[in-house]
């Protein structure tokens, strides 16, 4: 039962990722990845250091690294996240 449950959860996650790749703009896609990362590794209400490189974020989203860098800078200007010493805090 547990095996079937874990396979189903992975399938749902992959379906959601594919849906996000097709319909969302770069900012929304990165925000979804950051929210998912924070839900797994962070505490509600506190900023968490994202220990993924920009290249890893680009690989997860299918974007070029330049697009990821531009989008992260835009999100920083909009105060959706912060960058300190090259590290992303969300």
Image: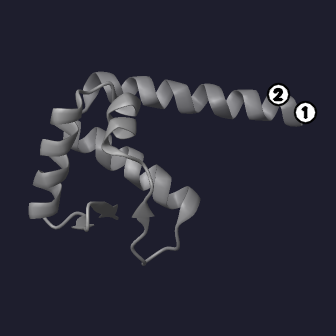
On residue 4, which mark appears? 2
For the point 47% across and 50% down, the residue is: 36
The answer to whether residue 74 is seen in the rendering is yes
| Circle 2 crowding by C-alpha within 10 Å: few under 14, some 14–19, many from 20 | few
For the point 64% across and 30% down, the residue is: 10
Q: Is residue 68 above or below residue 88?
A: above
Instruction: Give the residue pinned by disc 1.
Output: 1
Task: Specify whether 81 is left or right of 2.
Answer: left
For the point 16% across and 34% down, the residue is: 66
Task: Specify whether 12 is left or right of 44.
Answer: right
Of 50 and 11, nearer the camera is: 50
The answer to whether residue 25 is seen in the rendering is no
Of 26 and 20, nearer the camera is: 26
Position of the N terminus, as image quadrant, is top right
Q: In this view, does 2 lie above or below 62?
A: below
Cα gap from disc 2 to disc 1, whole angstroms? 5 Å
For the point 39% across and 52% down, the residue is: 34
Give residue 32's position: percent from left, percent from top.
37, 46
Q: Is mark 2 on a helix, strand or loop?
A: helix
Give residue 2's position: percent from left, percent from top.
87, 37
Give residue 25's position: percent from left, percent from top.
20, 34
According to the image, what is the colour scheme of the structure?
Answer: one colour
Give residue 64's position: percent from left, percent from top.
23, 27
Position of the C terminus, as image quadrant, is bottom left
Q: Is the Cβ of the residue at disc 2 closer than 8 Å to that at disc 1? A: yes
Q: Is mark 1 on a helix, strand or loop?
A: loop
Of 6 and 64, nearer the camera is: 64
Q: Residue pushed farthest front? A: 85
Q: Residue pushed farthest bottom? A: 45
């Amino acid at each position: 039962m547990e095996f079937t449950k874990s396979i189903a959860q992975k399938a749902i996650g992959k379906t959601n990722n594919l849906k996000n790749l097709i319909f969302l703009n770069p900012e929304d896609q990165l925000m979804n990845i950051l929210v998912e990362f924070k839900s797994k590794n962070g505490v509600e209400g506190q900023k968490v250091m994202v220990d993924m490189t920009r290249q890893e974020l680009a690989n997860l989203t299918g974007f070029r690294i330049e697009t990821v860098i531009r989008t992260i800078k835009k999100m920083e200007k909009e105060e959706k996240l912060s960058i300190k010493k090259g590290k992303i805090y969300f």
